[in-house]
Amino acid sequence: MENKQIAIPHFGEPDVLAIQYTQIPQPQKGEVLVKVAFASVNPIDVKTRAGLGWAAAQNKDNLPWVPGYDISGSVIECGEATEKFDLGDKVAGFIGFPLQGGGYSQYVTVPESSLSRVPEAVTLEAAAALPLAGQTAIQALDKVSVQEGQRVLILAGAGGVGHIAVQLAVAAKAEVFTTCGESNLDYMATLGAHAINYRFAPVSERVEEADALIDLVGGDAALDALKCLKDNAKVVTVPTLSAELICEKAKLLGFEATGMLVDPNREQLDAMLYLVSVGMLKAEIYQIYPMDQVVEAHKQMETGHTRGKILLDMQC
Ligand SMILES: NC(=O)c1ccc[n+]([C@@H]2O[C@H](COP(=O)([O-])OP(=O)(O)OC[C@H]3O[C@@H](n4cnc5c(N)ncnc54)[C@H](OP(=O)(O)O)[C@@H]3O)[C@@H](O)[C@H]2O)c1
């Protein structure tokens, strides 16, 4: 048996992505071997494949490189000194972040401490959608310390990070405003947010006196959104490319502003899996592509208009 993986042999367009076969890895001390059911696709995978950003810079001499940070699947072998899982247990995790990646594989070895158990009531599809995007959402909400009754503006509420951030902010009893295109207005309303069509008018014409901004778009959209905030509001800007500019401008206007880099945190994934299991959180899956169609999956991600998450089915 071999390990079928999707690799970046050299940086470029989506069609550089190639299937490769390697040996199935052996779990080391403290690790388990996971047969991956689903891997999710994140914007960072697409940027790295194109040769952009720090993950590409760090791995440029390390190609072919296997991307992927989100996995769900089953434990099929337990290494020495492991105790948390039995064979067949369903697990999910945010793995190999930021430099190692490796999630676009049929088999991966993972320290058992970085894996969460997937509850019976949660599908492996939902479990694969949550790790990177969901933890980004939680950590962004933490940075602006969203409180009950506050007015929170979330740019791009329909995306991978945004749809989780909207649901968690609504659950925290904040009044949530979010931007999206026309086709997502109803979807955002069903999640409990006031949805604003960003193509119709700048958000600054529609929202005022917000206590916090969670920016998932960056650039001009974020600069405009600063006009929606009240004095002493808090800002977190998540896209790394424009973070410095947005923070600088926000601070000049008297706001507390920060960028962020998501930090893998298993407890946060445990908490989201629990919320999904009791019906308080829903992972939206836009489409599942067989792993052989990863090029199409990357092309879809590059449109910038995916609702929720894209998954790769790693066993077909
Ligand atoms: N710093 C970190 O640690 C970190 C972690 C995760 C993600 N990120 C970054 O954060 C950003 C969001 O990530 P993601 O995974 O949520 O991306 P995503 O899933 O690709 O976001 C897609 C969504 O963006 C919406 N959108 C596009 N342009 C918009 C605009 N001008 N205004 C409002 N919404 C717009 C689309 O909605 P419509 O179709 O309705 O337009 C779509 O639903 C990316 O830049 C990503 O690289 C950074």
Image (cartoon, grey):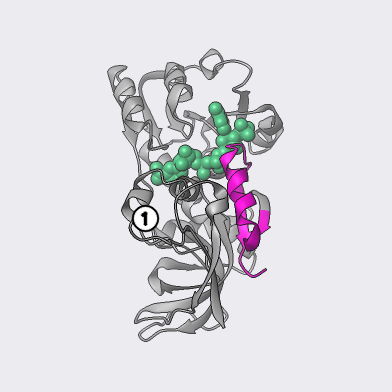
**Compared with residue 232, is residue 37 higher up or lower down, i.e. above or below?**
below
The amino acid type, in three-letter code, at marker 1 is Pro
Write the residue at 39% across / 56% down. Answer: 264
Write the residue at 49% across / 30% down. Answer: 149
* Residue 300 is one of the magenta-drawn residues: yes
* Residue 157 is one of the magenta-drawn residues: no
**For this view, does 315 lie left or right of residue 237?**
right
The x and y percentages for residue 206 are 56, 16
**For this view, does 216 lie left or right of residue 15?**
left
Corner quadrant of residue 110: bottom left
Give the magenta-colored segment's residue range.
Answer: 288-316
Is residue 129 something that shows in the picture?
yes
The x and y percentages for residue 83 are 41, 82
The x and y percentages for residue 61 are 33, 58
Quadrant into which the C terminus falls = bottom right
The residue to which callout 1 is attached is 98
Q: Nearer the viewer, residue 243 or 281?
A: 243
